[in-house]
Amino acid sequence: MKAFGKYISKHLASFAAFILVLALLNVLAFGITFQSVIRNDYGDTSPQNMLEEIAAASTVEGVSDDARQKLESAHVWAMFLNQNGNQIWAVNTPEDIPRDYTIQDVALFSKGYLKDYPIFVWNTEDGLLVLGYPKDSYTKLTSNYFSIHAIQTLPLYITGMLAADFLLLFLAYFFSKRKIIRNTDPIIDAIETLSDGKPVSLSIGGDLSEVAGSINKASRILSRQNEARANWISGVSHDIRTPLSMILGYAGRIADNKTINSSVKEQAEIVRQQSIKIKDLVQDLNLVSQLEYEMQPLHKEPVRFSKLLRSYAVELLNDGLSEFFPVEVEIKPAAENAMLECDSRLILRAISNLVQNSIKHNLQGCKITLTLDNSATGITLTVADNGVGLSPEKLRELGEKPHYMESTDERLNLRHGLGLLLVRQIVEAHGGTMIIESEPEQGYQTALCFRLQAGQS
């Protein structure tokens, strides 16, 4: 998107501006760090200026009082040598400094050191003015001189400035990254929510407002499409009910008519049973659609799960469940009084779908166990059987199929896929999770886990 490009370009320009400011700060820091060195080496007390000033204020007989005081304040000693190398006068010369010099001695110390004192000379008509600076104050090369303090400070300065630069660059990167993440996280979350088919509404200003507007537009389009799809399913379901009821009625009368031969009655019973399956399928499809598009209102109230589970088991047995499918209810002591804010009608629908799956996929019969457990984190309701189970491939298919209509397996087609999808939708509508476990010939188990909210127990 162009808006994203502008956003990233703006941050890159800001980062480049920061680097420029950082470079200027480095120059400023260099000036502050070395201003004293520059002032000393090239200011009033620098060797060159001192030579000129002392030379102007001295004669063969001696040096002026002002010049003497300046030498003392700068901790510089001085002496004047005549043409023969003999010392004419001296100011504060150390004890180890000789008084007489040969031409060779003058040639050596004039370009370097005398007794480790940095030496600076000024040639006059009457002789040679010699200034000696404290030891370890300057280092002298053939053509220049440098402050030892500056040479010692330079590595520390470079190290310190590099460390400061890296620190500032890291902080700039860190805060820039945090700002980008803070600005883009709502957009990423909105896109993920939108990819799940749920509507979103973003309110973001600044550079990313255009992106937020595009996402909101896509959300509105998706919402209209979902609503149209849900309304279409609801309308089709409604239109099917009337002819389906007539088919059920006629099939029931034929099946119950004693004057009709047994072959026709059997066929009528098959029609009735298949019509009942279609009716259940249409109801499931309509409910799945309503839950998926959040069009099914939840009528929540505090429900005691142990009572709900026992009531369902009694109703199941009273409806004439085959003896090949014994049902056992196991309520853990900790779950006897467990309460949850939920829609009991939908929870019963989820339990019934799981039980019917066990019945439909174990034609030779199986034991069905309904278990209720409670912990500090939530309630777990488990529906399990000891039937044929599922292969790892089929189990993975159940977990991976995003929608029942994508299932291509006859055994999983519609009833298993749609039934489990409905269970998952009901559980997720209550903020819970569904966990399926199964192995071939080792049974099938589905655990519905509901997290307890504050105030529930």
Image (spheres, rainbow, N blue to C red):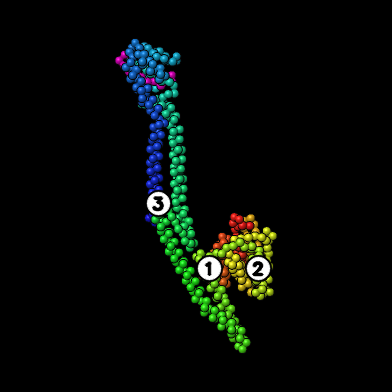
Residue 351 placement: quadrant? bottom right
List x then y, in percent, for residue 409. Answer: 55, 71
Asked whether residue 163 is in view, the answer is yes
- Marker disc for residue 311: 2
Q: Are marks 3 and 2 in contact (CB under 8 Å)?
A: no
In this view, the residue in front, 374 or 363, is: 374
Query: Quick one: label 1 or label 3, which is nearer the N terminus?
Result: 3
Query: Quick one: label 3 or label 2, which is nearer the N terminus?
Result: 3
- How crowded pointer 1 is (Cα within 10 Å; few <14, some 14-19, many 20+) is rated as many
Circle 3 sits on which residue?
206
Classify 252 as above or below 157.
below
The CA span between labels 1 and 2 is: 25 Å
Classify 93 as above or below 368.
above
Q: Name the dominant secondary structure of the magenta segment.
A: strand
Q: Could you tell me the amino acid type at mark 3?
A: Gly
Q: Are marks 1 and 3 in contact (CB under 8 Å)?
A: no
List x then y, in percent, for residue 121. Answer: 36, 19
Q: Residue at 56% of width from left, 81% of height from top?
A: 249
In this view, the residue in front, 60 or 432, is: 432
Circle 1 sits on which residue?
288
Residue 173 placement: quadrant? top left
Q: Which residues are magenta?
A: 114-126
